[in-house]
Image (cartoon, helix red, strand yellow):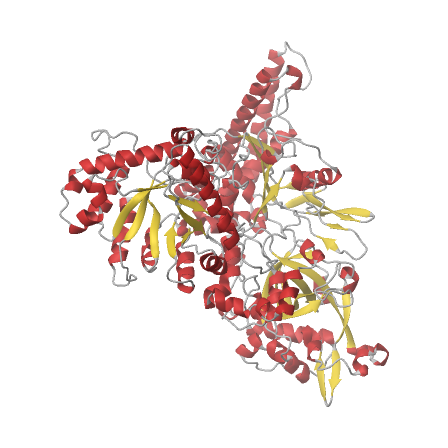
Amino acid sequence: MVPDTDFSVALTKPLEVVQSIYNDAADKSPSNITKLVETHFRQLFASPDASAKIPSLSPGNIDTLLPAPSSAAATSHRLVRFRAMIQDTGLGTEVFLAKHQQGDSTFTGLYGGEASISSSNDSSLTDTNELDHQNLAERTVMYAVSVPGQSAWAAQAHREAVAGQTSNSSVDQLARDTSTVSLKDPESPKKIQEVRERIRKAVEQGKKIGSAGKEPRLVAISKLHPPSAILAAHKQAEQLHFGENYVQEMVDKAKVLPREIRWHFVGGLQSNKGKLLASIPNLYLLETLDSIKAANVLQKALASPDAAKRDEPLRVYLQVNTSGEDAKSGLPPILSADAEAAKDCQLLELAVHVITKCPNLRLRGVMTIGAAANSSSADAEAAKSVDEIVSANPDFERLIQTRLNLIKLLRESEHVTNADESHTKEAYADLLDGGDASGGLELSMGMSADMDVATMAGSDNVRVGTDCFGRRPGSREEAMNMMKRELEVGPEAAAAESPSHEGSQDQSALKTSSVPQAYLAKSPLPESAHVGGLIKLYDLDAAEKFKTTELIEVVGIFDTAGLPQAEWQDTGSAAGTSSEPAQVPCVHAICAAPAELDSTAPEASSSTRTDSSVLSQSAERTALIEYLAGALSGDKVAAELVLLATIARIHVRRASLCLGALTLNVSNFAAPSTSSSTSQTQLSRRLEQLLPAVVDVSMDLASLNDDKKPLYPKSGGGGTGLEAGRLQLVNGTTIVVNEGAMGEGQLKDTGIRNIKALSSVLESHKLPYAFPYSEFEFDTDLNSIILSQGKSFLPFDIQCPLEPVDHSTDAYSESLPQVDESQVRGWRRALSHARSLATAKAFEIPESVSEHIQQEFVAERKREQEEAKDSHGGAGGKAEGVLGQEDLLRRMALVRLLALSYGEKALSIDMWKKAVELDKVLAQRVAATQSGQQRSQPASAASSGSAGVSR
C-alpha cells in the first residue's frame, strides 16, 4: 500500500518517502519498489502546479540543492528536475547494495539510500563474500549535461525559483566545479592602474603636439562583472566611476556596493525603466539620452515621491550617431552652425528641451560610439598635431564639430535665452554667459581600442570595459548566476562565506584545484556555464531506450557520486588520487522521459500548441521576416530562407535520403573585421532570441586544428571515456557556421577530420563517433546555416547569394533592436509549433495537389528541353540546366517548409507557386553570381551547375 505522504516531505526529504514505501511493501524486490516509487511520485506531482514546485538544476542554484556531507541522507537529499542531454551511455551498469541491515532496522539502498549507511567500518558491509546476492541490484549509469547552446530565455522557462539557503565550503567548491567557474582574486585593481597609466602617457604625448593636456574621467564599464570586482577596483584602485548597460543589474549592484560610487548608465533606456533608474541615489550620469520622450520619462521619474533623494539633478549626455550606422542609437550630428539650416535639428531640439523643460536633468555633454573601423584610424605615436589626430577619426571630428555648433546655436536660441526658470540661468551659466568655449559641455568619446587617441583629441570622458575587468561572461544569464550570492548578501559577506577565507591551507587548495579534465571534456561547450553529472536509472528496460544526444527530463533524488573508476582512473580526481574518484552531481532517477527541445515549459504538450496562427497572420510573419532581414543587410529573400532552415526537421529517413532537412548556404556574407571585438554574427544573436538552442561553429584554422576542440565525440580508450564534440548536440539545435574567419593556412590532420565530421552532419545528417579501433555514425538532426563570402566549400542543399538592401548595417553588431516582448514570445511559440517533429509528420499533401505538381513539373521540363534543343541546333541528349530529379526534390523541400512557415497543415497549389517563384529567384541570383565570377576569372575556373545545389 502506498502511504499518503505529505507533499512538502516528498520535495525536501524524498528518501524518507522511498524508505516508507519500502517498509510497507510486501514484495521488496528492487523491480517492484522501483515501480511503486515511480507511481507514487507521479501521482503526487501529477498537476502542473505541483510539478512546478520541483526545482530545476542550473549552475546558479546547484549549491543550494546539493546535500550537506555531514547531514543524514534522508533529511538532506532533495527532489530535483534535471533537463539534460545524454552525453555518454557507455558507463554501463553498476552493482549496489539494495538492502542492508542496521541493528533491528532494514534500509533500502535504492535511489541513493545506500548513503544512509552510518559507517563503512563494519566489515559485514564491505566484505562482499559475506553479502547475500539477493541484497545486490543493478542500475544503469549515464552521463548528462545541461542543454548545450541553450538560449537564456529558454533556460529560464525551465527553471524554478529556489529559496536562498545557507551553503558550506565543500558544497560551494563542488558548485564552482560543476559550472566550470572558479573564484580568484579580482584582476580589476591592477588592470585599472594599467589603463590609467596608458591615459597618462597619452596626456603627455598630447602635450607634445599641442593638446590641452587634461586627463579624462575614466568610466570602468562593469557590465556583467560581479560586485566583488567592482568593490576591489573601488577600494584598492580608488576607482570612482563605473558604467552599466542594464538598468536592473545597476539597481542590484548599487544596493550592495558603497554609496560613494558614481554610476553611469551607458545602455539604451526603455521607457518602463525610468522609475528603476530614478531609484538609484548615486546615479551620476546618463550617457545615452537620444529623445525628448526619454527625457520626459526621466524628468517625471525623478520628480516622483518614490524616487531616491538626490543632492543635485541627474547629469545627461546627448548621444550622437556620428557614424550614421543604423545599428547604433543616437541622433544625427550638427555639422552646420547656421540657425536656419538647423531649425529642424533633432539634437538641438532635444538640448533645448532638456535645458528649458527638465529641471531634474542637467545637460552636461555629447557622446558617441563611433564606427569600429575608425577606432584605429589614427596613430597616437606618429601624430604631429592635434588636428592630425582629430581629422584621422571622422567620429571624433564630427562630435567636436557638433559640440561647437550646438553651443553656438544654444546661445542664439530664444527659447534658452528667454527661459524664465531660475534653474536655467544658474545651471547653465557657462553656456549662457559665453565665457567658456566649451559651454560647460563635455565630450565623451573613446573606449578600450581608442582611448589613447581620444585623450589626445580632447575627450573629457572615456569608457573602458575589457581592459579594466578582463573578459566578461559569455551571457547575461551566466553572469547573473555567478553574481547571485553577492547580490543577495553583498560582495564582502559572500567573500567571507567562500572557502578562500577559511584559512591559508584551504585558500591554497582552492587556488590549485580545478575541474577534472575529462569532466570538462564531456561537455560539448565546456567554456559555457553548465551542469554535468551522472544519472542513475533503476528502470533498466527504460534505460536501454535512451541514446546519446537525446534530451530527457529526469525527476530524481539529488546527491553526489564518484565517477566510475574504470572510466576516470587516468584523469585525476578532486581528491588528488585515483583511489578517490572525482565527486560530481548525481541524480537518482525516479522517472525519466524524452523531452522536446522546443517545449516552452517542462510540462508542455503538443495539445497546448495552438500558436501556428501567428505565422498565418500576414503582418506578424512579415514582421518576423523583417526582424531576420535586419541581420542580413535587409535582404528579405535570404531572411525567408533562414526562416525555412530553422524550422526544417527530418521526418523520414530512407537509406541516404533525409526528407525534411534543409542545409542553407548564405553566400556573399561579410567576414568579421580584424578590429571587431566579436566574431558572433548579428544573425546568430537574433536567432538566440527566437530559438531554444543556437551554437556558433568556428571555422578559423586555429580552432579546426586544435585537437582539444574536436567537432565530433571521441574515446581514446585507456580510461578516458567518451569525450564530447562540439557537434554532439540535441536534435533541433541550430548551428551557424561562419566561414569568414577561415583565413590562410594549412589544415592539419585534426582539422581535416573536423571538416569531414561537419560535412557529414550537413550532408548525410550523421555525426561520427571515433573509438580507438573503429568509427560509428549516429543520426543527427541539426538546423544548419552556413555563412560564406563565396560559395561554401561545405555541402549544402540550397545557396542564397546575399543581395544587400541596406549597406550600412553591421553584420557583427552586438546590439539588438528593441522588439515588444509579447511579440517575441508569439514568434517563439509559433516557431516552436512549426519546428515540432509531430507537426512535420502530420503535414499532408493532398493527392490532387500532388498530381498538379507532377504535371506542371513535367510540362516545365519539356519546355526547357525544347528550348535547349532549339538553342543547340537540334542536338539531342540532356541539356545543361534543364530541370531534373534534384530540382524537384529541392522544390518539394521548399514548398513543405514554406507551408509550415505560414502555419498551414496541408499543401496547396498557391503555396507550390510561391515555392517555384522562390526557387527561380534563387536560380537567378546564383546565375548572376556565377556570371560575375566568370567575368573576373578565367573561363576554366568558372563554376557551373544547377541553381543553388551543391551536390
Residue 498 sits in quarter: bottom right
Furthest residue in direction right, as rendered: 129
Asked if residue 753 lies left or right of residue 333, the reply is: right
- Residue 731 locus on image (x, y percent): 62, 50
- Residue 649 locus on image (x, y percent): 60, 45
Q: Is residue 426 above or below residue 493?
A: above
**Viewer-proximal residue, 217 or 244?**
217
Furthest residue in direction top, as rendered: 873
Q: Is residue 759 above or below residue 138?
A: above
Q: Is residue 47 above or below residue 865?
A: below
Asked if residue 78 lies left or right of residue 335, the reply is: right
Who's the residue at 77% across and 56% down the image?
720
- Residue 566 locus on image (x, y percent): 79, 62
Who's the residue at 56% across and 36% down the image?
894
**Viewer-proximal residue, 466 or 580?**
466
Residue 117 sits in quarter: bottom right
**Quarter of the figure that contains the C terminus:** top right
Asked if residue 888 lies left or right of residue 400, the reply is: right
Furthest residue in direction bottom, as rendered: 104
Q: Residue 333: tell me if it is visible.
A: no
Q: Residue 381: tell me if it is visible.
A: yes
**Quarter of the figure that contains the N terminus:** bottom right
**Viewer-proximal residue, 183 or 732?**
183
- Residue 90 locus on image (x, y percent): 75, 58
Q: Is residue 159 above or below residue 78?
A: above
**Viewer-proximal residue, 26 or 93?**
93
Disc tally is 0
Asked if residue 433 lies left or right of residue 58, the reply is: left
